[in-house]
C-alpha cells in the first residue's frame, strides 16, 4: 500500500505546494502589517487567526492528497446531495452583516459554500467522464447546467453574488475540455452577453451584428437561427426589468463600475481608495507597515477583499508581479497536468480547479484595480479567512492527488 | 469507472493556456499602469488626500425631574488628541503642550499610552481643558504637528439634590471595558458609558449617536474643512428622560437623612412613581466627572460606611415587626383567627424549652389583633403564627413580591431571602429546624432578608388594596401593572384599619408619623430589627391618604433603635411637605 502510494506520489507536482506556501507567506506578511498597526491585541488579529487556520488547512491538504481517487469518483454524487442540504443550513443560523453565508459553530464561523466549489468540480468531472458523451449536441449541456445552477442559486440567495458566480465558472471550461463545440459555448454565452450589452445602445448594436455573423457562419436551420437570434434580442430588451429585481447594493456595485464618481459613499469609494493606495505604492512600495492609505483605514475590508491594495501600497509593483506570476504559473501548471493526465476524470477535475483559481484571482484582482464591480471575493492564499484558506489548500491537495507530473 | 480516456486536443490546451495568459496580462498591465505609469499622480493624491475621520461625540440626554427641573446636564469641555503617526518627536511635543497648558508632561505621556489604539487613529492626550488653555495651544499649533483638539460634553449636576444612587454615574470606556462590551465599534476608548443607576439602565436612550466628520488635512497636519461627498454624519444627541422624582421632596429627604445611614423612599402607590429615593450615606454625583479631585474619589471609595452602595435595592435587611402584617394578612384571609380574641402579654412566652420575649418587658396586658399590630406586641404574634404552616407564610411573602426583584428601572437589584422549607432544609438539615423558627420569622427576624425597595412595593400594595403600580422612575407609554396580590376586601379593610390604629392609638408605635393635617389619615407599621451589627435597625413603612392623594413612605435607619422613635418622624416631615406643599417650597437649583 505504502509502496504503491510512494510510487504514486513520487510523480505528484510538489512545486504546486511550494507556490501556494509562497503566496500564503506573502499574505501573512501583509496581515501582520495590518495587525501590528491597527490592533493592540495580536492574539485577536487577523494575522494570528490566519496563522492558526494554517493548521486545519494543512490537515485539509493532506486529507485531499491521501483520499483515494476512486472513492471520490464513486461517492461524489452522494456527497453532492449532502452538501446541497448543508448549503441550506445557514438559513437557520444567525445573520452576519445581513447575510446568511455563515453557519455558526461556536467560536468558528464556517462557510459551507466554500466546499460546494470542490464538490461541483468533482460532480461535473464524473458526469462528463462517465457518460461517454457526444458533446456534439447542445442538449448535453443540460444536466451539467442543472448540476451547477441549483447550488449557485441557493448561494446567490444567501446573498453571495461573488461565490455564486465563481461556482458557475468551472462549467464552460470543463464542457470545453470534454469536447463541446465552440459554437455551443457561444450559444451558451450569448444570453449573458445580450443582457450585459443591453444597457449600452452601441454595444448592443455591435453584439447584434456579431450574432448574425456567427450564426450565419455556422449555418443552422433557418428556423433555429431566427429563434436564437430573436430570443437573444428579446432577452436584451428584458434586461432592464431584471435589473430592477436586483438588490440595491448589487445594483450599486455594478453601477459604480461604469461611473466611479456616481456613488462616492458606496462601492466606488472603495475602488478610488484602493487605486490610490496601489498607485501611490509605485515600483517598490512605501515599505512594510508604512502604507498611509492602508493604516488610515480607508479600506473597509483590507484584510480580505482588498489585501492586494495593502501589498501594492506597501510592497510595490515588484511584489504584485511576483504574486501574479506565481498564480499564472500555478494555474498553467494545473492546465498542463489536466492536458497530460491519462484519464478524463482527472483531467476534468484539474481544469475545473484551475478555473476556480482563475476566477478567484481574476475577479479579486480586477476588483481591486477597479476593472470590475466590487464583488466581495477573496484572493486565494493571501486574503484572511479560515474556510477559504482551507478550501484553497484542499484544492491544492486535489491537484497533488490526481495530477501526475510527466516532466519528472 | 475511471476508464474514460483523456481526449483533449493539443489545440484546445493551447487555447486555454492562451486565455489564462491573456487574462493575467490584462491584470498585470493594469498594475503597471497604476503603479509605474501613473505613480506620480497617485503619490500626490495619497499625500494631499489625507482625509481624517474625526468622531464627534454626541451629548447625552438630560435627566429631568417631574417638574422639569434639570437634575443632570452637560457642559462642554475640550479634549486634546494627537495622531501618533504624525508626531515626529513625541517627547518634544509633550513638553510644548505642557508649557502651553501647565499640565505635567508625564501625565500627557501616560494618557498617550493609555488611549493608544493605532498609528493613525487620534489618541487622547488630555481632557477637561479650559477655553484659555485651548487658545494658547491654538497659537502654537504649527509647532505641534499631529495635535488637535475637539469638544467633548461632560456631565454636570445643576440641582441641589445628590440623588447619586438612582442617577448613577458614567465611566470612561477603557480597554477592559471595551472588551467586555463585545462590539468595539459602538464605543471608542475615552467615550463615556452609563455604569450604574439610571445612567446605565437607560444607556441606550441617553447615549445618542456619535457623528463622523471627514476633514481634509494639509501638509502641516492641520485639519481643514469638511470633505464633501464623504459620509459626514452629524452627531445625534441622546434622548432626555423625565423622572417621576420630585426634586423638592428628594431634597427634603436627603436633608432629614443626612446624619444617618439608611434609606428613605417616597412613592405614589397607585401609579408606582418614585417621588424621592435616598440612600445614605451618599456622595456628590460630580465626583465621577473630570472636575473632581482624585483624593475625594479615594475618600468615598475607602469609606467604611460604603457610600457607593445603593442600600435601597442592594441592601439586605431583616424586616422586623413590619412583617407582622404578613402574618396578620395570612391569618385573616384563611379565617384562622378571631380578631377580637384577646391574648395576655406578660412580656415573655414559653415555647417548648425556649423563652421568647416581648420588646415591652413589662408586658402589654390583654391584646387583640388590632392592638397587637398597633402596639406591635410580640407575644400575640408568637401565639397566632402557630396556626400557620411555614409554606402558608412563605406563599404570602411571595404574593407581595418578596424574594423576587421588583423590576424597578435600576440595574443590579437584589432579591433578598424568603426561607422556604427547601431553603431551611438545605441550611439546617432536615431535622435542624422547627416551628420555633417560624416564631422568629413572624417577627421578621431569623433567616428572612428583604431589600427596602421590596418594602416600598409591600406598603404600596397594602395602601392600594393590591392595586399598586409597578415601581418606576421613568414612565413608559404602556406602564406594566404591579404584582397584584389577591386578598378579600374584608382582609384589606381590616389590615388598613389596624395600620391606621398604629398611628392613631394612644399607645400605637407609629404615633410620631402623624403631622396632624386636617383630612389626612396616616397608617403604618414600625419595625425594630435586631441584627448582628449593633443597635437594631429602625423601620417605618406607612401611607398617608387625603382626598384622592396617597403617599407611601419607607424609612430605614441602620442601627437607629426603635422605628417609632427615629424613623416615623422622618415620614411625618414627608407627609407634611407632600400634603401641604405651599408651606415651604424650596429652590432646587444651585444658586450660581
Image (cartoon, helix red, strand yellow):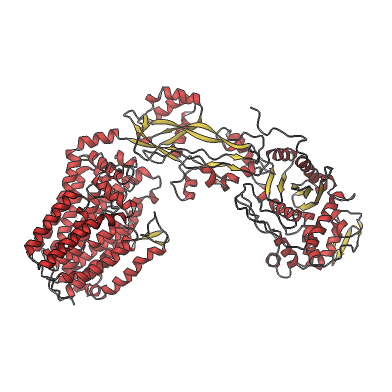
At x 29%, y 50%, the residue is A253
Q: Is residue A54 left or right of residue B407?
A: left
Q: How many labels sit on residues?
A: 0
- In this view, B364 is above or below B257: below
Q: Is residue A16 left or right of residue B323?
A: left
Question: Image quadrant for the C terminus of chain A?
Answer: bottom left
Front in this rendered view, residue B567 or A135: A135
Q: Position of residue B121 (x, y in %)?
A: 39, 38
Furthest residue toward bottom:
B1
- Residue B445 vs A6, above or below: the answer is above
- Decide which of B486, A311 is in the foreground and name it: B486
Say which of A84 and B262 sits in front: A84
User: At x 82% / y 54%, what residue is drawn?
Assistant: B499
In this rendering, the answer to whether A182 lies above or below B140 is below
Residue B437 is drawn in which quadrant? bottom right
Is residue B225 rendered to the left or right of residue A27?
Answer: right
Where is B111 relative to A230, above or below? Answer: above
Q: Position of residue B68 (x, y in %)?
A: 63, 38
Q: Quadrant of the N terminus of chain A?
A: bottom left
Could you say where residue B56 lies in the image, as x and y percent from the top left? 45, 37
- In this view, the residue farthest toward the right is B365
Q: Decide if residue A137 is on the left or right side of residue A280.
A: left
Residue B85 visible in the shown view: yes
Q: Is residue B536 visible?
A: no
| Horizontal and vertical percent position of residue B323 | 77, 57
Amino acid at each position: 500500500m505504502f509502496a504503491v502510494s510512494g510510487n504514486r506520489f513520487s510523480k505528484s507536482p510538489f512545486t504546486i505546494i511550494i507556490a501556494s506556501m509562497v503566496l500564503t507567506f506573502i499574505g501573512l506578511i501583509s496581515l501582520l502589517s495590518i495587525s501590528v498597526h491597527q490592533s493592540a491585541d495580536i492574539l485577536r488579529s487577523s494575522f494570528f487567526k490566519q496563522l492558526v487556520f494554517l493548521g486545519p488547512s494543512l490537515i485539509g491538504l493532506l486529507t485531499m492528497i491521501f483520499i483515494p481517487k476512486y472513492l471520490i469518483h464513486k461517492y461524489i454524487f452522494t456527497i453532492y446531495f449532502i452538501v446541497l442540504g448543508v448549503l441550506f443550513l445557514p438559513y437557520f443560523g444567525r445573520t452576519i452583516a445581513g447575510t446568511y453565508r455563515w453557519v455558526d459553530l461556536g467560536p468558528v464561523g464556517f462557510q459551507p459554500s466554500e466546499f460546494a466549489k470542490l464538490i461541483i468540480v468533482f460532480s461535473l468531472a464524473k458526469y462528463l467522464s462517465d457518460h461517454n458523451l457526444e458533446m456534439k449536441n447542445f442538449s448535453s449541456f443540460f444536466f451539467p447546467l442543472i448540476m451547477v445552477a441549483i447550488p449557485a442559486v441557493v448561494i446567490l440567495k444567501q446573498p453571495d453574488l461573488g461565490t455564486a458566480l465563481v461556482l458557475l465558472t468551472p462549467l464552460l471550461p470543463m464542457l470545453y475540455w470534454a469536447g463541446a463545440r465552440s459554437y455551443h459555448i457561444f450559444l451558451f454565452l450569448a444570453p449573458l452577453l445580450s443582457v450585459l450589452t443591453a444597457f449600452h445602445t452601441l454595444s448592443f448594436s455591435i453584439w447584434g451584428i456579431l450574432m448574425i455573423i456567427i450564426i450565419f457562419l455556422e449555418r443552422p436551420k433557418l428556423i433555429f437561427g431566427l429563434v436564437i437570434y430573436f430570443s437573444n434580442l428579446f432577452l436584451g430588451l428584458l434586461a432592464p426589468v431584471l435589473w430592477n429585481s436586483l438588490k440595491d447594493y448589487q445594483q450599486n456595485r455594478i453601477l459604480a463600475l461604469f461611473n466611479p464618481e456616481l456613488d462616492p459613499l458606496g462601492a466606488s469609494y472603495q475602488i478610488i481608495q484602493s487605486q490610490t493606495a496601489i498607485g501611490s505604492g509605485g515600483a517598490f512600495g512605501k515599505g512594510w507597515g508604512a502604507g498611509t492609505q492602508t493604516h488610515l483605514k480607508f479600506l473597509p475590508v483590507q484584510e480580505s477583499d482588498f489585501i492586494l491594495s495593502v501589498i501594492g501600497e506597501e510592497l510595490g509593483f515588484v511584489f504584485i508581479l511576483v504574486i501574479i506570476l506565481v498564480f499564472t504559473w500555478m494555474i498553467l501548471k494545473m492546465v498542463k497536468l489536466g492536458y497530460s493526465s491519462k484519464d478524463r476524470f482527472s483531467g476534468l477535475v484539474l481544469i475545473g480547479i484551475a478555473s476556480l483559481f482563475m476566477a478567484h484571482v481574476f475577479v479579486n484582482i480586477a476588483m481591486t484595480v477597479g476593472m470590475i464591480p466590487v464583488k466581495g471575493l477573496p484572493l486565494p492564499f493571501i486574503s484572511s479567512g479560515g474556510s477559504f484558506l482551507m478550501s484553497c489548500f484542499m484544492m491544492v491537495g486535489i491537484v497533488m492527488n490526481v495530477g501526475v507530473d510527466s516532466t519528472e | 469507472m475511471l476508464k474514460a480516456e483523456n481526449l483533449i486536443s493539443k489545440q484546445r490546451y493551447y487555447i486555454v493556456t492562451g486565455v489564462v495568459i491573456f487574462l493575467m496580462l490584462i491584470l498585470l498591465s493594469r498594475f503597471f499602469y497604476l503603479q509605474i505609469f501613473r505613480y506620480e499622480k497617485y503619490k500626490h493624491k495619497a499625500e494631499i488626500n489625507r482625509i481624517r475621520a474625526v468622531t464627534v461625540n454626541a451629548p447625552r440626554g438630560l435627566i429631568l425631574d417631574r417638574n422639569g427641573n434639570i437634575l443632570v446636564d452637560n457642559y462642554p469641555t475640550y479634549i486634546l488628541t494627537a495622531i501618533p503617526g504624525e508626531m515626529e518627536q513625541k517627547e518634544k511635543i509633550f513638553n510644548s503642550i505642557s508649557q502651553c497648558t501647565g499640565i505635567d508632561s508625564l501625565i500627557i505621556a501616560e494618557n498617550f499610552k493609555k488611549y493608544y489604539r493605532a498609528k493613525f487613529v487620534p489618541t487622547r492626550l488630555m481632557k477637561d481643558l479650559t477655553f484659555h488653555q485651548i487658545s494658547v495651544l491654538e497659537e502654537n499649533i504649527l509647532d505641534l504637528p499631529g495635535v488637535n483638539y475637539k469638544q467633548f460634553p461632560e456631565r454636570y449636576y445643576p440641582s441641589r439634590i445628590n440623588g447619586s444612587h438612582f442617577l448613577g454615574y458614567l465611566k470612561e470606556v477603557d480597554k477592559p471595558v471595551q472588551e467586555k462590551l463585545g462590539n468595539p465599534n459602538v464605543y471608542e476608548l475615552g467615550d463615556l458609558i452609563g455604569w450604574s443607576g439610571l445612567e446605565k439602565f437607560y444607556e441606550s436612550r441617553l447615549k445618542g449617536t456619535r457623528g463622523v466628520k471627514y476633514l481634509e488635512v494639509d501638509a502641516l497636519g492641520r485639519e481643514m474643512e469638511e470633505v464633501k461627498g464623504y459620509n459626514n454624519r452629524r452627531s445625534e444627541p441622546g434622548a432626555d428622560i423625565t423622572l417621576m422624582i420630585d426634586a423638592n421632596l428628594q431634597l427634603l429627604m436627603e436633608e432629614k437623612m443626612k446624619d444617618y445611614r439608611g434609606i428613605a423612599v417616597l412613592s405614589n402607590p397607585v401609579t408606582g412613581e418614585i417621588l424621592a429615593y435616598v440612600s445614605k450615606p451618599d456622595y456628590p454625583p460630580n465626583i465621577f466627572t473630570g472636575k473632581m479631585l482624585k483624593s475625594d474619589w479615594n475618600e468615598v471609595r475607602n469609606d467604611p460606611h460604603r457610600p457607593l452602595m445603593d442600600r435601597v435595592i442592594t441592601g439586605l435587611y431583616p424586616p422586623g415587626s413590619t412583617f407582622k402584617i404578613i402574618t396578620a394578612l395570612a391569618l385573616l384571609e384563611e379565617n384562622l383567627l378571631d380578631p377580637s380574641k384577646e391574648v395576655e402579654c406578660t412580656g415573655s412566652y414559653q415555647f417548648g424549652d425556649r423563652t421568647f420575649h416581648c420588646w415591652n418587658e413589662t408586658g402589654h396586658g390583654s391584646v387583640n389583633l388590632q392592638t397587637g399590630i398597633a402596639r406591635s406586641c410580640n407575644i400575640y404574634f408568637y401565639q397566632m403564627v402557630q396556626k400557620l404552616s411555614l409554606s402558608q407564610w412563605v406563599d404570602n411573602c411571595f404574593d407581595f413580591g418578596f424574594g423576587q426583584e421588583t423590576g424597578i428601572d435600576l440595574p443590579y437589584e437584589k432579591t433578598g431571602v424568603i426561607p422556604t422549607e427547601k431553603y431551611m432544609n438545605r441550611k439546617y438539615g432536615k431535622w435542624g429546624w422547627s416551628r420555633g423558627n417560624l416564631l422568629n420569622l413572624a417577627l421578621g427576624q431569623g433567616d428572612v432578608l428583604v431589600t427596602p425597595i421590596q418594602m416600598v412595593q409591600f406598603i404600596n400594595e397594602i395602601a392600594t388594596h393590591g392595586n399598586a403600580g409597578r415601581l418606576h422612575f421613568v414612565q413608559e407609554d404602556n406602564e406594566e401593572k404591579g404584582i397584584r396580590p389577591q386578598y378579600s376586601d374584608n382582609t384589606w379593610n381590616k389590615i388598613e384599619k389596624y395600620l391606621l390604629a398604629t398611628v392613631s392609638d394612644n399607645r400605637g408605635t407609629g404615633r410620631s408619623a402623624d403631622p396632624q393635617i386636617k383630612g389626612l389619615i396616616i397608617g403604618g407599621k414600625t419595625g425594630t430589627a435586631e441584627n448582628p451589627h449593633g443597635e437594631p435597625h429602625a423601620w417605618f413603612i406607612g401611607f398617608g391618604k387625603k382626598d384622592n392623594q396617597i403617599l407611601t413612605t419607607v424609612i430605614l435607619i441602620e442601627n437607629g433603635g426603635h422605628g417609632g422613635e427615629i424613623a416615623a418622624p422622618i415620614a411625618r416631615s414627608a407627609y407634611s411637605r407632600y400634603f401641604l406643599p405651599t408651606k415651604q417650597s424650596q429652590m432646587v437649583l444651585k444658586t450660581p
